[in-house]
Image (tube, helix red, strand yellow):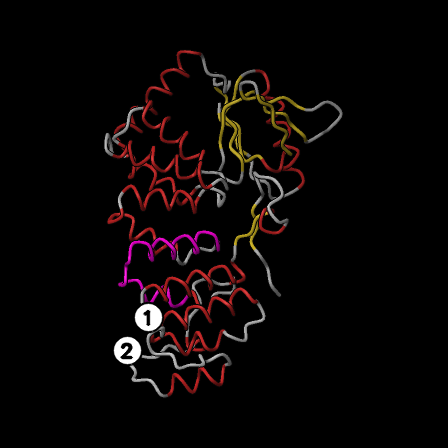
Amino acid sequence: MLEKVQMKSGWQHVLLAAALVAATAGADTVYLKNGVEFDGVVTPVPDNPGIFKVTAGERSLVYRAEEIDRVEKNEKTGKLSKEEILASWEEQNRILTEETGLTAEQRSLVMGLMFELKTDNVSKRMAVREKLIGLQKEFDAYSFLANQLPGVSILIAPNLLEALAYMDSSRALELLQGGAENNYFGTRVMAIELLGRLGHTGSKDLIVRGLADHKQEVQISAIYVLAGMGAREVTPALISLLPNPDERVSNASREALQALWANTLPDPKPGTVDEWTAFWTAQEKSGTPVQLADLKALSNPEEEIVSSIDTNHGAGSGAETTVASEG
């Protein structure tokens, strides 16, 4: 028996309620107006006209009559037998094994290590990373973890990105370049640092954009990586960062300038913006000079993902994430 009532007026509401009451004798398939459907047993809530409880297995949910599109009578209670549960698990395991190339045991092992990457302890992080590198020599754990990366917590993502880079640096390059534009600054920082560690000069233009980031940690990471790459063309941008109100950014810029021009600096060394500008003007240029004002930031500040760890100075773990809203 199929019962369907479209809600267009008050008397149709009454008809739907009557239909739902009539459908409470056995099991049903409930179709909600939002497109969700599930099996269960529909029963009216005493003393609450138009309110119905749907029991699916061991769970019970309450809905208003106007939320329900239709109810189909059948014997589906929503409760699975042990045999059905086991069959469902075996089928899911078969599909995952085909898709990932890993057995259930291998997937469980790799996932366990991935969750251990939720740590601020450097020694522990490195130990987990080494275990994953070891597993990569036995089977392709990289592909499985790379597929997990987009959906993991921001408390894991930067460390997972690092592990992937060490497991297979050539395959990880695309992930690192994407990570440099991630909406979480911790991932941007890690991606830039890893591109620097790998010496990937082909990503220099991407790293340069980190100088214009709204997060000082990303700016500092980009400053030091570019200095390590010997990117003298960013000198004008670094000079513009010298008066930055954040002393960490200002000091990092000064250190980078001194490192880039270590063999050319006069005595005494330039110190002020004017002195560095005069020094730069006198130098023979190589490459296109980078101006800070011309750079496109790596991410949109309004889309920055933040956590309670970032806003509460590291108090606790398991932080909730939100999207920052400025203005």
Q: Secondary structure at mark 2?
A: loop
Inspect the image, locate mark 1, and give the three-letter code of the amino acid beneath it: Ala
Q: Which is more foreground, mark 1 or mark 2? A: 1
Front-most of residues 133 and 87: 133
Asked if the residues shown at circle 1 and circle 2 are in contact, with their CB atoms under 8 angstroms apart, the answer is yes
Q: Give above or below for 171 relative to 238.
A: above
Q: Where the C terminus falls, by quadrant?
A: bottom right
Task: Name the residue carrying label 2.
Answer: 287
Callout 2 crowding tier (Cα within 10 Å): few <14, some 14–19, many ≥20? few
Q: Horizontal and vertical percent for residue 109?
A: 36, 27
Q: Horizontal and vertical percent for residue 243?
A: 54, 76
Which residue lies at the image location 37% right of the left edge and 66% below the top edge?
227
Task: Name the residue carrying label 1.
Answer: 231
Front-most of residues 137 and 14: 137
- Tell me which label, 1 or 2, sits earlier in the chain: 1
**Disc count in the image?**
2
Which residues are drawn in magenta?
A: 184-209
Inspect the image, locate mark 2, and give the three-letter code of the amino acid beneath it: Gly
Q: Horizontal and vertical percent for residue 157?
A: 43, 45
Does residue 112 show up magenta in the picture?
no
Which residue lies at the image location 31% right of the left edge and 68% below the top edge?
230
Q: Horizontal and vertical percent for residue 242?
A: 50, 74
